[in-house]
Image (cartoon, rainbow, N blue to C red):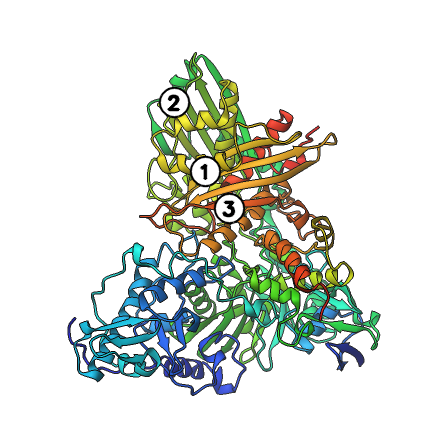
């Protein structure tokens, strides 16, 4: 039994230590907004925040996590889907199939925490999540939109 | 209008409830994520009325529009809702959508028509009957109000979900009158609006399905959770056509969470466990041995040699387009050109791997899955379960990408074959990404030899195009082959006429052929299908011919397209936007291409730079599309932008190669996606010219790659004929 701090709550986890955080979130905690895409930390669909930093949960065994590590998933990013990044995504109609977008939003939110007004180059460097539908142009525009409205979570 | 009979339709709610209950779903008190819209958004028991087959209206004026096709990101759900809403005269802000199930469709004699979604047909294939569905509902609502007011229906008008009796000014709402309207007989004849009167069609409205996609709430098939559900991972024979010889289940069974190790048909083994991750870990310990047969000798090299034979062979070849006599015209020409192009196998790589959840209980089978063809999914489930389709149901969820891959039902078949062995327990089968990449129905590999002849003045007098490639229809839909075995889909964009891609160039002597060379690798529909390769081959070679003739590539095309005004119009649009003919910025080079597919006319113009180290930077792409009508221009622009990533990713980096009879690439470490960094600035020109309905999801892909390849030639003098481009040094 391990304890994890997920979206502000401490939860008990019953799983082998080498089980990746992704599957604990999805199967044990029902937080299915975090997606399985490749399982090798390449596509970014499983991105979550750990202590404010974006991480790929498919490749983080839960034994490497402490109960004090603050894990935030897409479900915990904002109370009502009103994080500036989410609002920008909605305003610019970014998602197509939407499967990668939880990860994209988590990556963008983490970027804006560190770099409130990113350049295109900074966005390109930070946003390495795969979108097979090719929404990149709107993602980039939405990151700027969010930066303009409110770079940091308010 | 004829007086409507007062018969009562079975309400939508009763129908869904009873269907689900009969299947054990609601009877077991399950959380019902598959009831994605109507039931999920309001509590059970909230009433409402079905008004015609396509519309369900609640007392609070919410309008549920039925969507028979699949939403996989292409925006068809919003576009189809716009088509119905336009005729319904409802308040767009009150519109929601829901998927009827294929079981309901079957029970109601296919009242919602074809549920398959492919070939960019979602809107163009159903626009007329869904608009009629909206019009029928509007007429029923008006008639019900007129009956209540005892006035002629002709004196009543509907707008924004409100019906007004014009002479008296009395009004009622759709929500209030829907119950009475539901009891009327639907009119058999309705008149559709003229396009000039459209208020919702043609507007760049926001999508209806965004809110849940930005909060993690959208339920995809992979997210389904049922009480008592177990999770499965599977490995099918990596060498296509091989069978399971043996496996060692003791070690796997001793691993945490593992419940079952099951053989699935003759070709696969699955592990069922509490957690999918546990199942997948145990699967790796099975040491499966395969009876591989001679296919394990096949390689990309052997396939290449086999295709090479098709470039000149007389057997197994079919004609797609023929004018005059190309061979003697080219043989006698003042100047001759010949080139051979190559494109590899490609994987769809939907972000959501293939998966399905199945529950087999006695004489009933239910599946929760993502499919581009819900009726096909139902049929596959029934066949695998050994039941009649009427004993089965397929609950369709949003698709985390389709791109043609989810038109096949193999993952549903596998899920049911597993669930059948664990009756009464819902089993969610998820393919690992590695399994997903090993068991695709790949975009076909192909070679194309092109020959051309120019006269003394540089006029094109003859063109011969011979494609040697596997047939998609032979692999995926053999019933759609012509009687003589010809694969008509091979000629997309090269046809003498028709919506599926008319060859626009007027060439006095033309011969376009396909030598069918099927390998053991299953091939299938991959977004854009054969327009992708056909456009690369044709439009690169037309560029080669223009340069050989000493002519500007745009002017050369314009002359050949003189009698193809729609092809010409999109070409001119991109040329104008990119300022073709003016000097580009220093170090920047341009390329251009045009193609028709899926009923739509497309053209692209690219600006690229190649540095001294040979690194290519695609800076800008202008793409124009004339789809006749553009139901939602913003969605058309989004599809155009997105299609660039699909087309250019394949052209730049992606290839599935065959080694020892199996695919060598199993994940993103060996199959590169286009990322933000490489994505160019894309300008979509949406230019609907009216009077026809073209597709949108696929056609623009085809022009992105050849426009860039032609720009690469302008930049480097190198004609890249073998894809992907990463295999060619640009220095």
**Which quarter of the figure is the C terminus of chain A placed in?**
bottom right
**How much space separates mark 1 and mark 3, taking CA atoms?**
11 Å
Please give the name of the residue rendered at 66% of the width and 58% of the height, measured from the top-left corner.
A143
**How much space separates mark 1 and mark 2, taking CA atoms?**
32 Å
In this rendering, position of residue A126 left or right of residue B151: right
Give A63 or B626, whichever is nearer the viewer: B626
Chain for disc number 1: B
Image spot of residue B552 (x, y percent): 50, 23
**Which quarter of the figure is the N terminus of chain A placed in?**
bottom right
Q: Which residue matches tag 2?
A: B326
Q: Residues within 10 Å of mark 1 (few under 14, many from 20)?
A: many
Please tell me which of labels 2 and 3 falls first in the chain.
Answer: 2
Please give the name of the residue rendered at 34% of the width and 67% of the height, measured from the top-left corner.
B112
Q: Which residue matches tag 3?
A: B684
Which element carries disc 2, helix, strand or loop?
helix
Which element carries disc 3, helix, strand or loop?
strand
Chain for disc number 2: B
């Amino acid at each position: 039994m391990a304890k994890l701090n997920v979206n502000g709550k401490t939860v008990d986890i019953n799983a082998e230590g080498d089980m990746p955080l992704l599957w604990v979130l999805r199967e044990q905690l029902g937080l299915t907004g975090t997606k399985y895409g490749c399982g090798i930390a390449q596509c970014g669909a499983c991105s979550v925040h750990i202590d404010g930093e974006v991480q790929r949960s498919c490749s983080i065994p839960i034994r490497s996590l402490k109960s004090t590590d603050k894990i935030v998933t897409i479900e915990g990013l904002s109370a009502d889907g009103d994080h500036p990044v989410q609002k920008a995504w909605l305003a610019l109609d970014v998602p197509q199939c939407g499967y990668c977008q939880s990860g994209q939003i988590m990556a963008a939110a983490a970027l804006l925490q560190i770099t409130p007004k990113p350049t295109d180059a900074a966005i390109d460097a930070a946003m390495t999540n795969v979108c097979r539908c090719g929404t990149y142009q709107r993602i980039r525009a939405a990151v700027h939109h969010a930066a303009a409205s409110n770079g940091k979570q308010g | 209008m004829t007086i409507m009979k007062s018969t009562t339709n079975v309400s939508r709610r009763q129908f869904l409830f009873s269907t689900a209950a009969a299947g054990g779903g609601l009877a077991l008190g399950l959380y019902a994520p598959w009831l994605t819209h109507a039931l999920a958004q309001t509590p059970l028991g909230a009433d409402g009325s079905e008004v015609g087959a396509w519309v369900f209206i609640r007392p609070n004026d919410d309008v549920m529009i039925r969507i028979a096709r699949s939403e996989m990101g292409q925006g068809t759900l919003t576009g189809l809702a716009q088509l119905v809403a336009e005729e319904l005269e409802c308040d767009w802000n009150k519109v929601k959508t829901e998927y009827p199930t294929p079981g309901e469709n079957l029970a109601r004699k296919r009242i919602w028509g074809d549920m398959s979604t492919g070939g960019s047909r979602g809107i163009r294939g159903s626009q007329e009957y869904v608009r009629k569905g909206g019009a029928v509902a509007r007429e029923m609502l008006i008639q019900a109000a007129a009956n209540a007011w005892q006035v002629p229906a002709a004196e009543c008008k509907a707008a924004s979900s409100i019906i007004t009796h014009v002479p008296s000014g009395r009004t009622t709402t759709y929500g209030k009158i829907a119950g009475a309207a539901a009891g009327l007989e639907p009119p058999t004849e309705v008149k559709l609006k003229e396009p000039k009167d459209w208020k919702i069609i043609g507007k760049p409205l926001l999508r209806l399905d965004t809110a849940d996609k930005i909060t993690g709430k959208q339920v995809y098939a992979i997210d389904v959770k049922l009480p008592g559900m177990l999770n499965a991972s599977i490995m099918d024979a990596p060498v296509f056509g091989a069978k399971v010889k043996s496996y060692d289940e003791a070690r796997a069974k001793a691993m945490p969470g593992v419940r079952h190790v099951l053989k699935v048909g003759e070709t696969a083994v699955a592990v069922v466990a509490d957690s999918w991750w546990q199942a997948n870990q145990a699967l790796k310990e099975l040491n499966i041995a395969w009876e591989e047969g001679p296919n394990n000798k096949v390689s990309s090299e052997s396939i290449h040699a086999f295709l090479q034979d098709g470039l000149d062979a007389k057997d197994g070849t079919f004609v797609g387009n023929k004018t005059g006599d190309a061979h003697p015209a080219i043989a006698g020409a003042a100047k001759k050109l010949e080139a051979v192009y190559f494109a590899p196998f490609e994987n769809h790589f939907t972000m959501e791997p293939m998966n399905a959840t199945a529950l087999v209980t006695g004489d009933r089978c239910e599946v929760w899955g993502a499919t581009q063809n819900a009726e096909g999914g139902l049929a596959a489930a029934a066949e695998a379960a050994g039941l009649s389709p009427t004993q089965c149901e397929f609950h369709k969820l949003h698709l985390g990408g389709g791109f043609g891959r989810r038109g096949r039902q193999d993952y549903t078949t596998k899920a049911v074959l597993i669930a059948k062995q664990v009756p009464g327990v819902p089993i969610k089968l998820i393919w690992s990404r590695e399994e997903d990449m090993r068991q695709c129905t790949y975009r076909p590999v192909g070679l194309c030899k092109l020959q051309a002849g120019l006269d003394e003045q540089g006029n094109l007098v003859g063109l011969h195009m011979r494609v040697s490639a596997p047939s998609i229809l032979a692999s995926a839909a053999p019933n759609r082959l012509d009687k003589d075995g010809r694969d008509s889909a091979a000629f997309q964009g090269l046809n003498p006429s028709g919506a599926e891609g008319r060859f626009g160039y007027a060439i006095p002597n033309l011969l376009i052929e396909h030598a069918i060379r099927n390998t053991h690798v299953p091939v299938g529909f991959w977004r854009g299908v054969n327009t992708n390769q056909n456009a690369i081959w044709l439009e690169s070679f037309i560029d080669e011919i223009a340069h050989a003739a000493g002519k500007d590539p745009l002017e050369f095309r314009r002359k050949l397209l003189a009698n193809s005004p729609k092809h010409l119009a999109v070409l001119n649009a991109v040329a104008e936007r990119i300022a073709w003919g003016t000097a580009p910025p220093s170090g920047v080079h341009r390329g251009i291409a045009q193609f028709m597919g899926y009923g739509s006319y497309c053209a692209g113009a690219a600006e690229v730079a190649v540095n001294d180290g040979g690194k290519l930077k695609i800076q800008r792409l202008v793409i124009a599309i004339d789809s006749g009508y553009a139901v939602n221009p913003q969605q058309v622009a989004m599809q155009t932008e997105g299609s660039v990533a699909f087309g250019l990713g394949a052209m730049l980096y992606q290839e599935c190669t065959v080694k020892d009879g199996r695919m060598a690439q199993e994940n993103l470490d060996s199959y590169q996606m286009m990322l933000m960094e490489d994505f160019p600035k894309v300008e979509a020109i949406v230019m609907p010219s009216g009077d026809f309905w073209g597709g949108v999801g696929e056609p623009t892909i085809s022009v992105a790659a050849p426009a860039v390849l032609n720009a690469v030639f302008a930049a480097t003098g190198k004609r890249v004929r073998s894809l992907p481009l990463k295999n060619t040094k640009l220095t």
